[in-house]
Amino acid sequence: NAGVTQTPKFQVLKTGQSMTLQCAQDMNHNSMYWYRQDPGMGLRLIYYSASEGTTDKGEVPNGYNVSRLNKREFSLRLESAAPSQTSVYFCASSEEETGYTNRAPEAFFGQGTRLTVV
Amino acid sequence: DAKTTQPPSMDCAEGRAANLPCNHSTISGNEYVYWYRQIHSQGPQYIIHGLKNNETNEMASLIITEDRKSSTLILPHATLRDTAVYYCIVRVRRGGSNYKLTFGKGTLLTVNP
């Protein structure tokens, strides 16, 4: 199983350029997330999607847009890249918690996209 | 989500048990304790979670105090490959936007030969 796949793995952008980070999961999960991680820091949530067709802002949404294209895919777009957006970006997915069991769903993460904006 | 407090770093000898503490004194009754780890900037990896009972799986054991204000992750026989940043996270069990995980800075565990 591929799990969560992110593309590209590495990217260098010039200030002001735009790009889209792609994420796909093959586990039939409802919930998907985008995080960023800066050096020496924990992960910070940018946007998340609790189900297909819905998206919500996380802690640090400014400068980003997202699209939940279908159940499998959740993309993150930088419209006008800035050096402050240099970071490692992680996509994750998890099952929807139904409330009818005692099981709390774990999240599965991709391997990350290392983005540098110069 | 409740705030968690972890030591920034710990060392452990290879083959010995690694005990990683976490304080979550403001945890609510409907919040789970999760542990993830991140090896060398890879994507975080789920380890274990629990509500109030101790839990064990093939990777680790989770001990939660009776008042649920703290927990300990135990790696019974640490190996060099267990060197990683370990994150303790509390998260509500259900409820729309609360599926999200909030990461702190975690504990850097270094397993020494």
Image (spheres, rainbow, N blue to C red):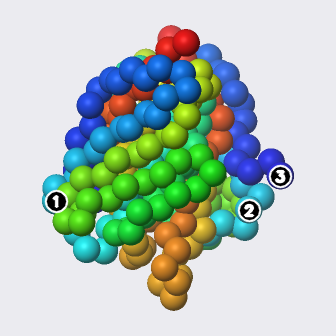
Q: Residue at x 32, y 59 (%)?
A: B64
Chain at numbered mark 1: B
Q: Residue at x 66, y 66 (%)?
A: A29
Q: Residue at label 1?
A: B26
Q: Residue at label 3?
A: A1
Q: Residue at label 2?
A: A27
Crowdedness near tag 3: few (<14), some (14–19) or many (≥20) residues, C-alpha within 10 Å: few
> Tag 1's secondary structure?
loop
Q: Please report contact status of discs 2 and 1: CB closer than 8 Å, yes or no.
A: no
Q: Amino acid at mark 3?
A: Asn
Q: Is residue B17 above or below residue B111?
A: below
Q: Please report contact status of discs 1 and 3: CB closer than 8 Å, yes or no.
A: no
Chain at numbered mark 3: A
Chain at numbered mark 2: A
Q: Is residue A79 above or below residue B109?
A: below
Expressed as whole percent of the image width and height from the top left, the position of residue A118 reads 50, 11
